[in-house]
Amino acid sequence: MSSTLFQQYDPREGKQVQILNEKGELTKDAKKFPQMTKDQQLMAYETMVKTRVADEWAVSLQRQGRMPTYPINKGQEANVVGALMAVKNDDWFVPSYRELCAYLVRGIPLDQFYLYWFGNELASQFDKETYHTLPVSVPIGSQLLHAVGIAYAEKYFKRNRLSISFIGDGGTSEGEFHEALNFGAVWNTTTIFYIQNNQYAISCSRKKQTLSKTLAEKAFAYGLEGVQLDGNDIF
């Protein structure tokens, strides 16, 4: 997305990017953006369905006491799949604990993902040149600092790679969030900070988390560009 489009969809003016609306219709702005091929659309759909089935099975295992712990991914499939398909395969994905879809887009075997939630640390050993994916970082917000660090390393070595990492609305209240955005801006790293607005962070609503009208506008405080997207719009 160019700076011009960032200006056209300034979240401080209540604007957001939406290509496919809630009725399944293309919006008038759809032609402004790159379109997915039919094969890409099929891959995205298959990945979202596979994620939903695998997610529900894992929840069932956890409720039966057969898996120690498990964070639900349900409802976040579209934005994660869309984001990971939009970056290059050798760009760095820096996960927290709720991005099963991204693992599948990267081609990481599902059994390796399950191993992690069964407490087997072999699950965190990825071949970096194959997957360009870091291990799960559980402490809220810590993954963003890792994303900035790895993007800075790529910049230092003059490699054209970005990093992308996700965080929930509640995570924007963590100190790590503000530190990561500040360092990313000052060091001019190529990092995508993807905030998922879940509306509720465990036991605290977004209205109690922040007085910012949107989460995307937080970027501007650090000299970054921010845009608000329809998170259920895969396109």
Image (cartoon, helix red, strand yellow):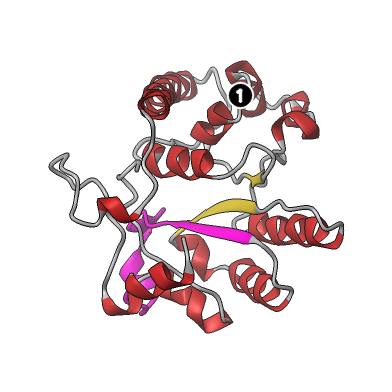
Q: Is residue 79 magenta?
A: no
Q: Can you give x and y, in whole percent of width and height, for residue 170 in the image? A: 46, 62
Location of residue 151 by image quarter: bottom right
Location of residue 4 by image quarter: bottom left
**Depth check: 51 or 199 in front?**
51
Instruction: Indicate whether 74 appears above or below 207.
Output: above
Q: Residue at x 45, y 37 (%)?
A: 81
Disc 1 residue type (three-letter): Gly
The magenta stretch is 191-213
Instruction: Indicate whether 68 appears above or below 72.
Output: above
Seen as rendered, the residue at the extreme left is: 23
Q: Can you give x and y, in whole percent of width and height, for residue 6 in the image? A: 41, 70
Q: Which residue is mark 1?
A: 107
Q: Can you give x and y, in whole percent of width and height, for residue 12 in the image? A: 33, 79
**Depth check: 199 or 102 in front?**
102
Q: Is residue 192 magenta?
A: yes
Quadrant location of the C terminus? top left
* 10 Å crowding of disc 1: few (<14), some (14-19), many (20+): few
Q: Residue at x 78, y 24 (%)?
A: 122
Instruction: Indicate whether 135 appears above or below 49.
Output: below
Q: Residue at x 36, y 63 (%)?
A: 228
